[in-house]
Image (cartoon, rainbow, N blue to C red):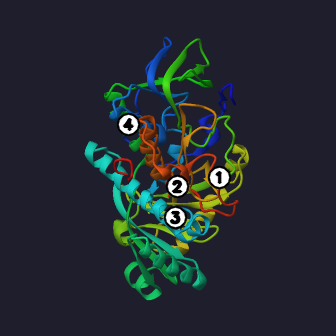
Amino acid sequence: MANGIEFDPASQDDLRSGRSPWGRGGRRPAFEPLTQSFKADALVIGGGITGALAAEHLTARGLSVVVIDKEEPGLGSTAASTAMLQWEIDSTLSELEHYYGFERAAGMYRRSAAAVSGLAKLVATHALPCQFQPRQTLFLAQNHESARDLYEERQLRRRAGLPGVYLEHCDLLTQFELDRDGAILSPGSAEADPLLLAWGLLDIAIARGAMLVKGTVERLHSEGGKVTAELDGPFVIEADTAVLATGYTMPGIDTPKLHRSTSSFAIATVPQDPATLWRGETLIWEDADPYLYMRTTADHRIVAGGEDDATTDPDRRDAKLAAKAQAIREKMKRLWPQANAEIATAWCGTFGETADGLPLIGPVPRMPNVYAAYGYGGNGITFSFLAAQMVGAMVAGIYRDWFDDYALDRDGPGFRNVRAGERGVETVLR
């Protein structure tokens, strides 16, 4: 890798298929033609939600920024997201305490909560039309044993100063009409249309002078304090800093030992009668394997997803979509019988996850001035906001000890069955 990074030729069609309900009524930012080689302070490779967040933040810091994508911005993994913007991490606080100790684990959860709060403030400040709504979350027990685990999880969260309450079966049934043994109800999460959010952020960056160009980066070099991107045409882009925001098509860097790819599946129903939806349209997810998660949309559809498996071949993944969609539909109907379970759209995508449920953010080993921003797992967009803040700080020469918690080459636990899917900081997150 000393000679550079080679990039994966995968296309957006390899990343996802089917049709999600996102982006309706929105306008994609327009590409500028690439007619010559040029220089910039920062090169962001990837125009999805992570690249858009990075571009917005870096331009807010006064840097000249180029965002490059070989296909339409946001139509890869971002379009396949279900955009449940949770601060609760795929690994419970109890699991992270086991891996890293209580203080580190509590800090990870607090920073995730701060990231959702920071994203909400960013959306409000710019009045981004992305159907952003604050939401509570319900983390549902699967059975009696799971309910005991969730009760202990809530006690540990209280010790960490995290908000939420534990609901017994009777409270859950009375308040939410859900027949489960227990749940944790937590404030502070949100939902959005991920495509409208990404496009709105790119528009902000472009208004500040950023360029959005169409092109394929084939190789990235880092030497002499500069980063040079070789493209598929006659031109090159030179920058002081490069940010890898290529989503779930990780380029040819040493694959972190904590990382693996998986496939996830989702459906959106026809619009529901609002009177038949659950209280507060709370984000719902299960402590189960395989699991179910649900949210609603601005036009009152139910979005439900899960049924993740280890399939990575696009053709094999796509062949499973019809059966997986029906399995999700049946689970949704059992959990919420009031739903009109007619499926309007179904989609699937290849996603990344890590063994500890945390993102991969920070310097790329042996590639000076190149940073990775990979918001993996069920908190993808939440972690992408965190990544933008962290990379911006690093570029400015600011370092915090906790940055190492997300390093690409960090040590961590071995793989187990991690919940995945996209359910999806102020200053430098203190």
- At horizontal 32% and vertical 46% (from top left) the residue drawn is 122
| Residue type at tag 2 | Glu
Q: Which residue is mark 2?
A: 422
Q: Secondary structure at mark 3?
A: helix
Q: Earlier in the sequence, mark 2 or mark 3?
A: 3
Circles 2 and 4: CB atoms closer than 8 Å:
no
Asked whether disc 2 touches disc 3, contact meaning CB atoms under 8 Å apart, the reply is: no
Identify the residue under disc 4.
56
Compared with 181, 85 (above or below) is: above
* 1 or 4: mark nearer the eye: 4
User: Which residue is depicted at the point 40% across and 37% down?
Assistant: 199
Q: Secondary structure at mark 1?
A: strand
Residue neighbourhood size for the residue with mark 3, other residues' Cα within 10 Å, grouped as few (<14), some (14–19), many (≥20): many
Q: x, y (%) of residue 335?
A: 52, 74
Identity, as a three-letter code, of the amino acid under mark 4: Glu
Nearer the observer: mark 2 or 4; the answer is 4
**Residue identifier under label 1:** 263
Disc on the earlier residue, 1 or 2? 1
Q: Check the picture and name the quadrant holding the N terminus.
A: top right
Badge 2 density bin: few <14, some 14–19, many ≥20, Cα 10 Å: many
Q: Earlier in the sequence, mark 1 or mark 4?
A: 4
Report if the CB atoms under discs 1 and 4 are less than 8 Å apart.
no
